[in-house]
C-alpha cells in the first residue's frame, strides 16, 4: 500500500470496481466460485474478509506492480486489468491462504 501511496494511486480508484463486481472481472467463473465459497464459509464479517482478500491480491502482485514504479500510469492500467486470467486453481488457493 505504501508504494501505491507514493505514486498517489489511492485504493478508492480501484477498490470500488472490486467491491461493485466482487472480483467477477478479475477471475473466471470457476475461480470465482472457489473464492466466494471460501468467503461465504468464513465466520468473519464478509466485508472484513473481502478486505483481506483484496490485500492479499495486492501483495501477490506487488513485485509486478513495483516494476512499473517509474510509470504510475502503467500501475493504474495494470491494476485495472490484472493478469489473473493466467492464474490456475493453485494460485487461487494461495490467494485464499494468504
Image: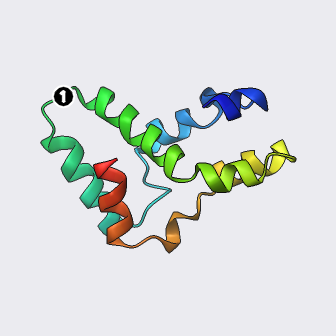
Q: On the rendered structure, is 61 left or right of 94? A: right
Crowding near the residue tagged with mark 1, few <14, some 14–19, many ≥20 C-alpha atoms within 10 Å: few
Image coordinates of residue 9 in percent, x first then y, are 72, 32
* Residue 21 shows up from this direction: yes
Q: Residue 51: where, in percent of width, then height?
A: 39, 32
Quarter of the N terminus within the rendering? top right
Question: Could you say which quadrant of the image residue 92 lies in?
Answer: bottom left
Instruction: Locate residue 10, reporting x and y percent.
Output: 67, 27
- The residue singled out by tag 1 in the image is 44
Would residue 26 appear left or right of 35 to someone viewing this image? right
| Residue drawn where x is 45% and y is 36% of the image | 19
Q: Quadrant of residue 89?
A: bottom left
Scheme of colours in the image:
rainbow
Q: Residue at x 80, y 51 (%)?
A: 74
- For the point 49% across and 57% down, which residue is it? 26
Q: Position of residue 37 (x, y in %)?
A: 19, 52
Residue occupying image coordinates x 63% and y 53%: 63
Q: Image check: 92 left or right of 63?
A: left
Q: Is residue 22 above or below residue 95?
A: above
In the depicted structure, whether residue 26 falls above or below residue 15: below
Viewer can see residue 8: no
Outermost residue toward the right in this view? 70
Question: Camera-side residue: 33 or 54?
Answer: 54
Task: Say above or below: 75 vs 94.
Answer: above
Viewer-nearest residue: 93 or 36: 93
Amino acid at each position: 500500500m505504501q508504494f501505491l501511496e507514493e505514486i498517489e494511486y489511492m485504493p478508492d480508484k480501484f477498490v470500488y470496481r472490486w467491491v461493485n463486481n466482487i472480483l467477477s472481472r478479475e477471475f473466471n467463473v470457476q475461480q470465482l466460485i472457489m473464492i466466494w465459497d471460501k468467503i461465504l464459509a468464513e465466520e468473519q464479517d464478509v466485508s472484513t474478509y473481502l478486505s483481506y482478500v483484496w490485500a492479499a491480491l495486492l501483495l501477490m502482485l506487488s513485485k509486478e506492480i513495483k516494476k512499473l514504479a517509474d510509470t504510475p500510469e502503467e500501475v493504474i492500467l495494470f491494476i485495472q486489468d490484472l493478469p489473473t486470467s493466467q492464474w490456475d486453481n493453485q494460485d487461487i488457493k494461495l490467494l485464499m491462504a494468504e
